[in-house]
Amino acid sequence: MSTLTGTAGMLGLTLRRERIHAPAWYGLSALLVVVVGAGILGTYPTNAARADLAATVNADAAELFLIGPMSSTDIGGLLLWRTQGIAILFLALASLIVVGRNTRADEENGIAEMLGAAALGRAAPLSAALSVAAAGSVSAGLVVAIGFTALGADPVGSAFAGAQVIVLGVLFAGIAGLAGQLLRTSRATTSVSVTVLAVLYLVRGAVDATGGSHWTSPLGWVAALRPYADNNLLALLPALALAGACVALGLRTASRRDFGAGLLPDRGGRSRATRALRGPLSLALRTSRGTILGGSAAAAVLGLLIGSVASTVDEQVSLDLGSTGPGLAPVTLHLAPQIITVLALVTLLRARGEVTSGRAEVLLAGPLHRARWLLAHAATAGIAALAALTGLGLGLGIAHAGTGGDATDIVLWTWAAVIRAPAVWLLTALSAVVLARAPRFAAATEFTVLGLLLALEFGTELRILPPEAPGLSPFALVPQLPEGAANEPLPT
């Protein structure tokens, strides 16, 4: 039997399982790219305005690090520059999640073992997951190309911009597939894959800021295509070769390694637990410490980057969202709790994974009440949100203090971020109730509610909803520091 036997059947099953998640990730990511691009067109309607922007951006190291250079001053060049960072992050995450969920995660929860009882090759699940990720990347690339063309960009350059999106998605699908064969757990696979994404993005930013060679990072290889300027299709060949190598190595490893094992050895743990690891809360914190530390560190770095470019961006674009105050940093602070709620919900939903994997059964077989166990996971989610908000506030404060402010800015911005935590905690508590009463529908319910709250915000900004609508959101009922009111009144 071939290692790819049953790939067609696995492809159908994977498509069935991903009929909601994959279109949401890839489709919404591509639409977000188009919508963000459409939003900036009105700010720079003429070639002269775009030329001035390009001169400013390409001379600002912080802008180059955060987003990248602007290689063309036509409409397409503006769209590409403003959205390339979003495209990299969201499309890469989409591929990492789709591949990881349908490969290593299935081995952990027993689904792969059940499927393997049939005539199924060892590499068939990975092959099917990679095919779905590739199809999602192609669909996202088509949406971006059509959207940019509809916004007035050159059709040829838009096609090359879509090709960039496709290659990005395929590249990180291959990286996720290979990581899933090297490591034994889905959590470790996700952590390593996201770390690779972060490192590549940081290297790309450092190279752009310092004027180094774009061949230093695979993201630089993709950027070397330069749509709307050079349209150099050959520049994609190295990235495609790397993606192909990752896919080939991943498929070969999947066909040869032991089931449930990884090529890299596991780190041996302690023979006995420490005194600190004596209850459900300490255990939940221990198993989620990577998420908490990684989320807070990423938020701090994001705060530093945004704070360092805020003054430049505020000179280019007038931003005002909610009642926190005008400017890039206040708008970031206004949106941060809603985004960090995703981190809290993902941390809370690990409780569901503990149940389906059987690990919770071991704990609950002892003298541990179910309510106490669930409260421990809810508290851990709240701590993760608080840590991320604290990191973001510290980053913004340090950046402001270093660009003409003083030490009091650090305290002000940190407090302005931390004071928003109760809104996140409220949604986390409600999600814990749903998880307890209807665990199968918890994830869908939680993210639907969060999406509706975001729709209230943007629907008001687009004047689709009345100005009082955001008052229904808990995010509007917390103090809107640093420049907004201490609290928002309830709608009447």
Image (spheres, rainbow, N blue to C red):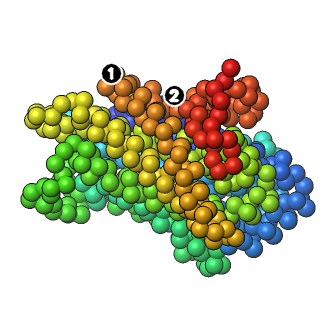
**On the picture, is 371 further left or further right than 344?**
left
Give the image quarter of residue 487. top right
Residue 4 seen in the figure: no
Instruction: State left or right for residue 62 relative to residue 150.
Output: left
Residue 436 vertical placement versus 279 (above, below) = above
Residue 449: image tag: 2
How far across and how far down the image is residue 390, in percent?
49, 54
Q: Amino acid at mark 1?
A: Arg
Relative vertical location of residue 373 with respect to residue 302 in this rendering, above or below: above
Side of 24 relative to 286 (left or right): right
Coordinates of residue 339 in the picture (x, y in percent) = 53, 44
Decide: few, some or many residues near mark 1? Use Cα within 10 Å; few <14, some 14-19, many ≥20.
Answer: few
Q: Residue at x 26, y 52 (%)?
A: 286
Q: Please give the residue where the numbered disc 1 appears in the rendered image.
A: 437
Q: CA distance from mark 2 to mark 1?
A: 16 Å
Crowding at mark 2 (Cα within 10 Å: few <14, some 14-19, many 20+): few
Check the picture and name the quadrant holding the C terminus.
top right
Q: Secondary structure at mark 1?
A: helix
Give the quadrant of the N terminus: top left
Q: Is residue 473 visible?
A: yes
Q: Residue at x 38, y 25 (%)?
A: 434
Image quadrant where residue 230 sits: bottom right
Q: Position of residue 423 (x, y in %)?
A: 51, 37
Helix, strand or loop at label 2? It is helix
Which residue is at the front of the view, 211 or 352? 352
Residue at 21% across, 30% down: 370
Q: Is residue 478 above or below residue 60?
A: above
